[in-house]
Image (tube, helix red, strand yellow):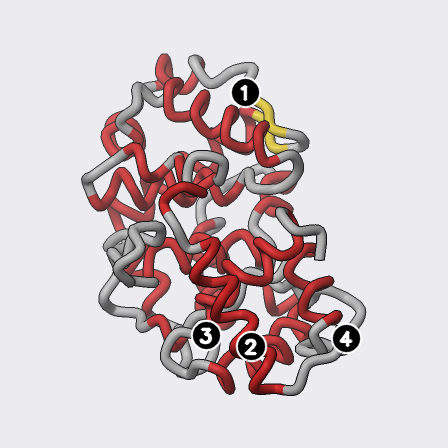
Amino acid sequence: MTLIPNDIKEFLEEKVALYNRPMFIESDPISIPHRYERKEDIEIAGFLAATISWGNRKMIVQNGARLMNLMGNSPYDFVMNYQASDLRRLDGFVHRTFNHTDLVCFIEALGNIYLHKGGLERLFAQNVTETSTQPAIHSFRKEFFSLPHPERSTKHLLDPANGSAAKRINMFLRWMVRKDQCGVDFGLWKSIRPAQLSCPLDVHSGNVARKLGLLTRNQNDAKALEELDSHLRAMDKNDPVKYDFALFGLGVFEKF
């Protein structure tokens, strides 16, 4: 499909309007944090749901719901007040290669962040640049794994400094930061602006972006994300990652 730049923008705007709707929440991992109203519950549920967001989407949502049930459907209270006996309840949890050992590691790290680092928003906001979240994700990751931890768990939080597009964390940041009238993203965080966000780049959005001429690099890595971000910012400098709805929807639902 060949479109000139103005046609691409118009085409994607139409798809954003189609897929940025509450009707798509139920089948998406964002449905997990949408169970909650308290800021910290939304943050933690969203972070953990994003962490396991790879593979079959139905299974992601099922396992995200199971995880919330294991945490008593009060993720912030669980993270702040868990006892050793509570952590034993998590035995047997697994989503693909993310298992209960990783889950305990992540819960301990989240507890440390809320107790000693001022929470997730404060930690991410410290190193966001005007045009990228990637430096913030890199510094966040160092803090996240500052406690003793199993080495195996580090693979579940990838580092942009090592060439990763960090799709899952950028998706989580989109959830927390973007604010519009559609009711999908939460817009909870005010210390980061939507203009600073990077697109959650995965196989679906990457393939669609290449077909539209928005991406030339073959790998879905940090360099590809920088290229894609530059094109999306050219179309909307204030809210570039709204086009994630279009790219992902075209790939997943329309097999574009």
- Mark 4–mark 3 contact, CB under 8 Å? no
- The tag on residue 217 is 4
Q: Nearer the viewer, mark 2 or mark 3?
A: 3
Secondary element type, mark 2: helix
The type of residue carrying mark 1 is Phe
Q: Quote the CA–CA distance across marks 2 and 4.
A: 13 Å
Q: Quote the CA–CA distance across marks 4 and 3.
A: 19 Å
Secondary element type, mark 4: loop
Residue 73 appears left or right of 50: left
Q: Of callouts 1 and 3, which one flags the residue occurring earlier in the amino acid sequence?
A: 1
Q: Nearer the viewer, mark 1 or mark 4?
A: 4
Q: Of callouts 2 and 4, which one flags the residue occurring earlier in the amino acid sequence?
A: 4
Q: Label 2: which residue?
A: 229
Quarter of the figure that contains the C terminus: bottom right
Q: Label 3: which residue?
A: 240
Q: Quote the CA–CA distance across marks 2 and 3.
A: 7 Å
Q: Residue furthest left?
A: 38
The residue sitting at 50% across, 31% down in the picture is: 61
Residue 144 versus residue 97: which sits nearer the camera? 97
- Mark 2–mark 3 contact, CB under 8 Å? yes
The residue sitting at 41% across, 20% down in the picture is: 87
Secondary element type, mark 3: helix
Quarter of the figure that contains the N terminus: bottom right
Q: Label 1: which residue?
A: 93
Residue 128 appears left or right of 142: left
Residue 14 versus residue 61: which sits nearer the camera? 14
Q: Of callouts 1 and 4, which one flags the residue occurring earlier in the amino acid sequence?
A: 1
In x, y percent, where is residue 41? 27, 38
Report whether residue 108 is seen.
no
The type of residue carrying mark 2 is Asp
* Structural crowding at the residue carrying mark 2, measured as other residues with C-alpha within 10 Å and reported as few (<14), some (14–19) or many (≥20): many
